[in-house]
Image: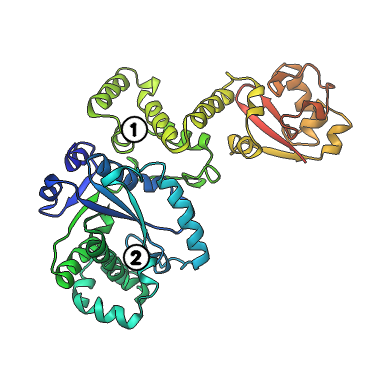
Amino acid sequence: MNFVEELRWRGMLHDIMPGTEELLNKGMTSGYIGFDPTADSLHVGSLAQIMTMIHFQRAGHKPFALIGGATGMVGDPSGKSAERNLLSEDVLQKNLAGIKAQLEKFLDFDGGANSAEMVNNFDWFKDFTFLDFIREVGKHITVNYMMAKDSVKKRLEGETGMSFTEFTYQLVQGYDFYYLWKHKDCKLQMGGSDQWGNIVTGTELVRRKGGGEAFALTTQLIKKSDGSKFGKTEGGNIWLDPEKTSPYKFYQFWLNTSDEDAKTYIRIFTLFDEETIKGLEAEQDAAPHLRVLQKALAKDITIRVHGEAEYEKAIKSSEFLFGNTGIEFLNELNEAEVIGLFEGVPNFKIALADLQAGINATDLLAASTAVFASKGEAKKMIQGGGVAINKVKIESPEAIYNHEFLIGDKFLVAQKGRKNYFLIIVK
């Protein structure tokens, strides 16, 4: 497998330094990508770089995942309009542990010569004094060189300017590359296209300080066809951590991809070969309403991130909400998963004591909760047969409900019509 050609046909390649492809074709090469430790989980925005490392390793090369324990204390100005908050060492350590656990799902850390390795730049910066840094690193890169970078120019032209802390970021990242080149024989740095300036500063430092040669490769930044930011929803980031984004919501994020974006994403985020993808595209073109691409994309990524069991649960969750699975399914979910499943659905809280005494359907839905605006409206729709509790039609406005109807000892699910759900949480 040719790594660069793999990125090309998948539409992932953006910039590549001359000589890089020739280097990779000679044999196993060590390369790295840096990951930002500003949270204890990666999100789908990180997946493009993870996929780059997967392809790199599958092509027989050795990937290093650099976690920016030191640079997380500084902040990268690339693509940002304001300086970000600096993190304490305790928070960073928690974040590093979470990211490491996630990367181990994707990369082979026990695969022989080209096993993946994880490194933390805090390890080589923690005892590096400021005076030593400016003498050993700063003297090799001119201010003119640093200011010519787009990431710096854009911030200097903006209203907020740039702090000295952020200005030095490219030197710090450049030294990462130099350190890995010297101590790990790492000859290639990869990243998103917004990192090109920082990466080539590293290759320049290797040349000027070490008298060596290093290379650079960047991938396309992922954007949605409508111009909005990839990986964001109204609820915020889509995380890889199931505690932050439920597997059901994660699955739905990919399933709801537009047809145009699905054709792009299936190349970038899956390991399907070109022939398989073209076959799926032909099926999609023949019957767009079946959403073949979206289903294949969502299934593949959900299984690789969360596992087969969580994928099956996500499918059942979808079927439940669209009326094809009985209420018993909710007993398979824990409390957080139930609440996650009904995210965005109106919910109401009532006291357990009120339910234990027994409450009629009309009062439950129009007094204890606001499923209906009035008791009259509730009675009318119940009598018309259009209201259900726990997917069972309410036969009478006076039907009594108590704690024995609870799902998981905590929930009641009300429906108006077929698709209007309401979650009643009993405390």
Q: Is residue 58 above or below residue 127?
A: above
Q: Tell whether label 1 touches label 2 (CB within 8 Å).
A: no
User: In the figure, residue 323 lies in which quadrant?
Assistant: top right
Quadrant showing the C terminus: top right
Work out which quarter of the rendered image holds the N terminus and state it.
top left
| Quarter occupied by residue 292 | top left
Estimate the x, y position of residue 240 in percent, counting from the top left.
46, 44
- Residue type at the position of mark 2: Pro
Mark 1 lies on a secondary structure that is helix
Disc 2: which residue? 77
**Tag 1 or tag 2, which sits nearer the N-term?**
2
The residue at the point 48 percent across, 66 percent down is 87
Q: Is residue 247 above or below residue 279?
A: below
Per the model, the C-alpha gap separating discs 2 and 1 is 31 Å
Residue 52 visible? The answer is: no
* Residue under numbered circle 1: 262
In this view, 98 is above or below 260: below
Display colour scheme: rainbow
Q: Residue at x 35, y 22 (%)?
A: 288
Looking at the picture, how far across and down is residue 295, in whole percent? 40, 26
